[in-house]
């Protein structure tokens, strides 16, 4: 596995055309032991070298132990597209079709939240690493201003499309730093959120992504209506091979 592609300023997996399916990591190293679910705190987000605490580095847009693998070497990879997706704004709007983009942290009349849920035949209990990938809109004016995001699991059901209002959140809240200059995909570590999902009973209502800071223009990302959709980049526990 090439660690360089995960370092700050580099494009990681999932940046090519969406729709890839299950593939095996090309390593012979096995994942040692099991992971305890719902015991991992969301990592600190980062977007540049030198922005992490001592003995850590910016890897896959989050602070990781210096020298650690970006993902478990023997994990199986699965990249998913949304089963449901919606953009929620605070302004009164008529519910309707999915807009082509969502603006995080921009002017009040344009700012929105993203709701996204992924289907597929996988179990949260098998997740050893997971990333939510968001693609910047190429036609939007890029901004080097940071917009800090919060990502958590949605606490109730919702419908795809566009709507006004808000959806509740539950479980651990992770963070991300949205920056569209350079126009690289945003990678959000959601491992802790999926571990929480696997450790409790209840329905999977997907993720809520919202801005907790603002900038002049905000950060604009594609919903998939006219570009690449959000994707869930999963790394699953390798099956046990009998001796």
Image (spheres, grey):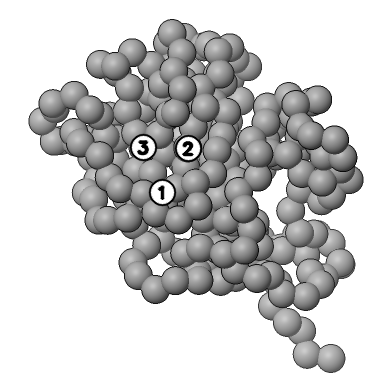
Q: Between disc 3 and disc 2, whose residue precedes? A: 3
- Residue at 77% x, 75% y is 33
Q: Where is residue 72 in the image (x, y as percent from the top left)?
A: 76, 59
Residue 207 image label: 1
Residue of label 2: 150
Q: Between disc 1 and disc 2, whose residue precedes? A: 2
Secondary structure of residue under mark 1: strand
**238 in relation to 188, above or below:** below
Q: Where is residue 15 in the image (x, y as percent from the top left)?
A: 61, 36
- Residue at 42% x, 39% y is 209
Residue 114 image label: 3
Mark 3–mark 2 Cα distance, whole angstroms, equals 11 Å
Residue 133 image label: none
Q: Position of residue 41 (x, y in %)?
A: 62, 53
Residue positioned most to the left: 94
Q: Between disc 3 and disc 1, whose residue precedes? A: 3
Q: In this view, does 19 lie to the left or right of 88?
A: right
């Amino acid at each position: 596995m090439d660690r360089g592609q995960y370092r700050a300023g580099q494009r990681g997996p999932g940046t090519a055309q969406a729709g890839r399916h299950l593939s095996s990591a090309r390593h012979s190293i096995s994942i040692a032991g099991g992971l305890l679910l719902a015991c991992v705190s969301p990592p600190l987000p980062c977007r540049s070298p030198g922005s992490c605490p001592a003995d850590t580095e910016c890897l896959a847009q989050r602070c990781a132990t210096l020298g650690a693998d970006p993902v478990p070497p023997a994990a199986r990879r699965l990249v998913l597209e949304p089963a449901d997706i919606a953009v929620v704004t605070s302004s009164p709007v008529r519910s309707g079709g999915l807009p082509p983009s969502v603006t995080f942290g921009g002017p009040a009349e344009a700012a929105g939240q993203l709701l996204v849920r992924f289907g597929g035949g996988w179990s949260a209990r098998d997740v050893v690493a997971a990333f939510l990938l968001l693609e910047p809109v190429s036609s939007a004016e890029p901004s080097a201003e940071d917009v800090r995001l919060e990502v958590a699991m949605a606490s109730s059901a919702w419908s795809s499309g566009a709507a006004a209002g808000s959806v509740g959140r539950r479980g651990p809240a992770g963070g991300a730093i949205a920056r569209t200059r350079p126009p690289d995909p945003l990678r959000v570590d959601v491992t802790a959120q999926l571990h929480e999902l696997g450790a409790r009973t209840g329905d999977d209502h997907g993720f809520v992504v919202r801005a907790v800071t603002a900038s002049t223009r905000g950060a604009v990302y594609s919903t998939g209506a006219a570009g690449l959709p959000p994707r869930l980049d999963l790394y699953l526990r390798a099956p046990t091979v009998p001796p």
